[in-house]
Image (cartoon, rainbow, N blue to C red):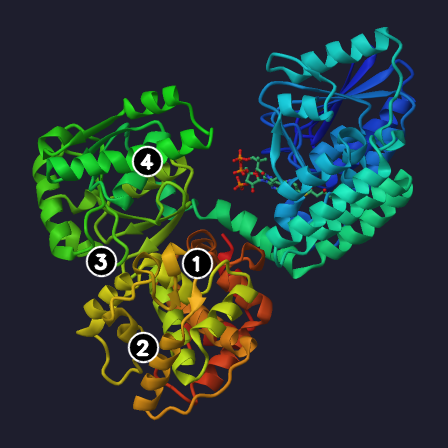
Amino acid sequence: MSEQAAPVQTRLDGEVLVVTINNPPVNALGQAVRAGLLAAVEQLEQTAAARAMLVVGAGRAFIAGADIREFGKPPQAPALPDTINRMEASGKLVVAAIHGAALGGGLEVAMATHYRLALPGAKLGLPEVNLGLLPGAGGTQRSPRLMGALPAAELMLSGKHLSAKAALAAGLVDKLVDGDDPTAAGLAYARELLAAGTGPRRTSELPVPGDRNDALAALDKLAQDSAKKTRGLFSPAKIIECVRVAVQTPFAEGAKRERELFLECLNSPQRAGLVHAFFAERETAKIPEAKAAQPRHFAKLAIIGGGTMGAGITVSALDAGLSVVMIERDAESIARGRKNVEKVYDGLIAKGRMTPEAKTATMARYTPSTSYDDIKDVDMVIEAVFEDIEVKKAVFKELDRVCKSGAVLATNTSYLDIDAIAAVTSRPQDVIGLHFFSPANIMRLLEIVVPAKVAPDVVVTAFELAKRMKKVPVRAGVCDGFIGNRILSVYREAANHVLEDGASPYEIDAAVREFGYPMGPFQVSDLAGGDIGWATRKRKAATRDPKARYVEIADRIAERGWYGQKTGRGWYLYPEGARVGQQDPEVLAIVDAERQKKGITPRAFTHEEIMRRYMAAMVNEGARVLEEGIALRPLDIDVTFLFGYGFPRWRGGPMQWADMQGLDKVLADIEEFAKEDAQFWQPAALLKKLVAEGRNFASLNQR
Ligand code: 3H9
């Protein structure tokens, strides 16, 4: 290996040994970096001319943490805690100059240096909790000594990044320096310290500031609050335990306990699920079209429709720095559209998260209009009108007439056939689906639906739009419901079967919440509006297989005008606009009447059986979606459900969940359920194939 390519490079600059971590893209602490850092410490001690060591990161970050790809693999020496402790113990001065990310193990390295400076743009944090972990290289012991017990625990539980300024105020760094060259700034700082005769100041030897009993009481309170907020998560309670130990015992003892608890977290299934989610989320943007095409230029958008969806998309576009012309059919509707947009910004102003001046500046890029003539020059159109194919086709004929050549024409449909919409234009190569999720300015998922005739550069442009809007894009093929809603309709149906066979909607919701979802499917239906699902069922009625089991209970509820929260009752009762529903005996009576009509004697379901059915239906349809090429990889399905449907992130997504159960078990469940209803529970060919070959879904994620 040439010196240039070495992951840790050292050079003596006067009396300072400059140690540069150079492991692109983000200087993660893989084995070679740990070994290099350890060797650098040895070099420092053996080099008489060196009186201090400066640690800096090359490229865009200081160090973004442990190498996440190494988790779950056999550990390789040297371990990070040992490396860091060795560095801190040095008798010579050790300084860190931080630019960019100093996260997780990266901040742990910095905290074990003797003095730290940060440049503007530095981001410091201990985000291990997001990966199901705790800081395992002394971070839970050193951060309380620098910041105080409670702020340190809060930082670790939130996983948030602090700016350089906030880190200074918190006591994590000693100095802020302007500029963009960490080596120059760090060298100057190290020389300044040497000149002042400053020696090592080891964080592990500092006391945790503040009163011990106060700190313990504050941690108890934090533990109670956190247990409510982080329901189902494994590592938060362990983080608090580590901080408690830091308050009560010397560093060495605390570090030992930290190690034990870190290993428990490392070996937990939650860590596997969360690490899968971390990489999956970054992988979905890697699509075949990106190899061959460049995005088209876009700066000015048209959004057709100013309803909730159109306004949410408008806010996303404005926030991404784009200009938007919003089109509505008449003066009254466009006034409402504008109000819908302003409402979002006024809400932010009320919460102190936006200034009125920033709103004015943002709204200057927004033009309301009732004339399609005003969108002649836009680079991209996103249609968000009523979900009806004829209405959408009419809009696209108009867009085809007015838009400039090369403009991207996107439809925000949740179910409809985008090939058919493209076919009414003279330019199907420019037509694509952008399925936003409501509220569109908040939900991060964007299904990018790729019809047969679309040009690759239009697909790439849609991914570029997602990036600028800070969305998580997933590439989907055209079918009824694309990835998410198609799979949803199947497991919702499985839930309906369970309902009709004996479980109450309240039991099903409770089982789904226990699994880790924020809400159960009947609560979601009440929130979204029962009329929406009803309209979909009516639309699909003509094509429904008359032999397939159909549960009518939801129709009985909707026929009464019980659409959920907006009508005061649905599956639940919402007296006087209450947001949390109450169980409704009348609903249970309707359910019973429907069972009787079909001659079904209700039976009991455990929560476990409810979830086995719910998940088996989800995974089986997921396998079909893969088989048909609607989703590129299992991880695309996982990301769809994590970001669009409230699937618990720590389970990694439905396909990862299936892998962790064992696909043979999931298939065995499906085959067992098929004994009652062979039509609904036909195992997907891909699932059978994977089980036969002893493979899992993850094997299809390989690039
Ligand atoms: C830890 O430190 C445990 C210790 O306490 C204890 C040990 C004993 N490792 O996000 P991006 C890759 S746990 C490996 O697109 P950005 C990433 O996959 C760790 N790879 O860029 C992507 O690869 P690709 C605690 C990593 O600018 C590429 O880098 N640290 C790591 O939007 C670019 O990433 C964290 O949790 C890693 N640690 O954001 C920090 N980090 O190009 C995790 C990134 O092949 N990282 N990659 O798709 C982040 O939060 C963001 O990546 C960061 C940059 C803010 C740094």
Give how far apart the Cα atoms at labels 2 and 3 are.
25 Å
* Disc nearest the viewer among 1 and 4: 4
Say which residue label 3 marks. 416
Q: Are marks 3 and 4 in contact (CB under 8 Å)?
A: no
Query: For residue 637, which numbered disc appears in the image?
Result: 1
Say which residue label 4 marks. 343
Could you tell which of marks 2 and 4 lies nearer the N-terminus?
4
- Above or below, 182 against 449 in this view is above
Report the amino acid beneath label 4.
Lys
- Left or right of residue 581: residue 130: right
Report the amino acid beneath label 3.
Leu
10 Å crowding of disc 1: few (<14), some (14-19), many (20+) = many
Could you tell which of marks 1 and 2 lies nearer the N-terminus?
2
- Above or below, 497 against 601 in this view is above
Give how far apart the Cα atoms at labels 3 and 4 are.
29 Å
Query: For residue 486, which numbered disc appears in the image?
Result: none
Report the amino acid beneath label 2.
Ile
- Above or below, 25 against 192 in this view is below
| Whether residue 272 can be seen here | yes
